[in-house]
Amino acid sequence: MPPSRRGDGVDRSDDDPFRPNESAERHRPRAARTLPAATLARWLLPARVHRWALSVSVDTPATAYERGEPVPVAIGLRNPLPVPVTVETRSPVPWTWHVDGHRDASHVPEPLPESETRFTLDRGERRRFTRRWQQSFRVSETEWRPADRGEHTIGAGIAVDDPEGKGVYDETTVRIE
Amino acid sequence: MAMLEVEDLNVRFYTDDGVVRATNDLSYRIEAGERFGVVGESGAGKSVTSLALMRLIDEPGVIESGEIRFKGENILEMDDEEMRSLRGNEIAMIFQDAGTALNPSYTVGEQISEAIRYHLDLDEAAARERAIETLESVGIPSAAERYGDYPHEFSGGMQQRVVIAIALSCDPDLIIADEPTTALDVTIEAQILELLEEVATEYDTAIQLITHDLGVVAEFCDRVMVMYAGHPVEMAPVEDVYYDPQHPYTVGLMSSIPRIGDDRERLQTIPGRMPDLIEMPPGCNFHPRCPYAEESCTRVEPRLVDVETGEPADPINSDAQTAACLAHTGELDGELDYEVTVRGEDGPAESGPASGSPGVTDR
């Protein structure tokens, strides 16, 4: 009896029920998928093209918040190109965020280790990270101070030297009422 | 000088999402022969702490700062060769999932005798002899015949015993038991704990027992450290923690233990969940879940203090009961309003909210 192909894409044979399934997928060439696209793109495209392709966005759901209300922040990284892009960052954490220039809304310096790391976004990849700014600044190891009313700038950028100049930075402002 | 002293240990994981602060300024000590319990919810940093002791933190984790002194020597400054001779020989680890910890392609006997050959410099026959003795001591029947069996031929409880046998094989001074009974049923759990207790008593081995089972800690440990979001919130002799808990998180943990004969309709739980270790809440990390939290808790991070004096704790040199809560430094307007009920003379302690109070879960 010839194998019958059913709607679920799995072919079965009543004579040999334990035969491994065969599907159209099995016969497709797969080797092309294993091309090291990120490595090739790194070799073939200049670094500035990689940086140019990578875009950073910072968004908050609203522009004004009541005092004490946490501010959700969405940080988006996007590569619109049909090839992977790779950016060399100066720390193992590929991006950082800040409020009014204070990284992680903290006045207490906590330096990141310096080590060159490659951060790759696949072709057309978007990645989204979130933070919640609690409307306070860390002012010492054990103390936090509420932010003043008024405008505050929330920014995020890739961990490279001068992210703003290199176009891998974005910021937004929120008002605390 | 204590056998093991951990001072201001900071472990970080550098990920694409940010910096995971797995342990924050963690300090404690373990004396020779002591049984030290580490409890807390999943994600509190218990396992990372034990892996750091063995220097087994892998990429992208980094021991950022601090000291781990074993018999006075800083483990973090040792080279790889020194570490290899320490691991399995003086400090041994019992991993939580025996099925994964054992190598499926070697016989259990070979996995035990490998450690013996390496550390004790015995020949093959003597190592085999000793491995069989160790297997017998952990209660594997017909140990000589089972020496050549592969891990898949053992049940889960027996695999755990084999992992314990590997840990015991070189008579270590410190055993780090990372949830050794989590994957086992309660009857096997009791046997394994009994076995560990025998070993600790017989060889005067110190044990760091990591668990989230407070019942096990009460039975087994001398001192206990309660961890939350990567740092200790309470550390004290086990009786003090059970009969007189001094941190709301400890109280919450104890209220959530089910007990036979309990007349409560529902178990009390701690509302919410452990904070994201990338983005800790400001002030006290526990304040979003704490029924006693006030404005000051969102502004000031409490340090571990002696609950009697309110002075900064010295977990390395002192046995005093310590807790990290502003209630003990006088910075809280209210009080920790709960009471502890002890059932029966030798019965377990029960913590619960005082009647009429908002309680630990009603917030």
Image (cartoon, coloured by chain):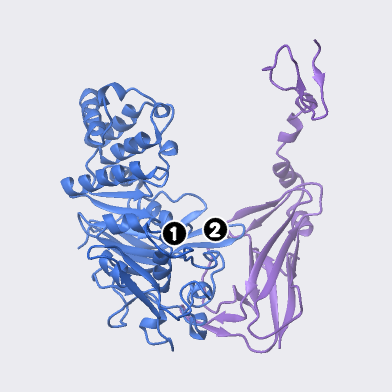
**x%, y% of residue A119?**
65, 54
Residue occupied by mark 1: B45
Judge whether A50 appears above or below B338 on screen: above
Left or right: where B35 falls relative to A8: left
Judge whether B131 appears above or below B60 on screen: above
Q: Which mark is residue B14?
A: 2
**x%, y% of residue B148?**
33, 22
**x%, y% of residue B80?**
36, 45
Please give the name of the residue rendered at 73% of the width and 41% of the height, measured from the top-left corner. A37
- Which of A40/B231 is in front? B231
Please give the name of the residue rendered at 17% of the width and 46% of the height, measured from the top-left corner. B203
**x%, y% of residue A68?**
63, 83
Q: Are marks 2 and 1 in contact (CB under 8 Å)?
A: no
Q: Amino acid at mark 2?
A: Tyr
Q: Which chain is blue?
A: B
Please report, as a chain letter, where disc 1 is located: B
Q: Establish whether labels 2 and 1 are both on one chain.
A: yes
User: Does residue B7 appear in this view?
Assistant: no
Q: Earlier in the sequence, mark 2 or mark 1?
A: 2
- Which of B49/B154 is in front? B154
- Which of A102/A7 is in front? A7
Q: Colour of chain A?
A: purple
- Determine which quarter of the picture holds residue B242: bottom left
Please give the name of the residue rendered at 81% of the width and 51% of the height, measured from the top-left corner. A81
- Which of B286/B30 is in front? B286
Cα–Cα gap, marks 2 and 1 = 15 Å
Please report, as a chain letter, where disc 2 is located: B
Q: Provide the secondary structure element on which disc 1 rests.
A: loop
Q: Amino acid at mark 1?
A: Gly
Q: Provide the secondary structure element on which disc 2 rests.
A: strand
Which numbered disc, 2 or 1, marks the residue closer to the eye? Answer: 1
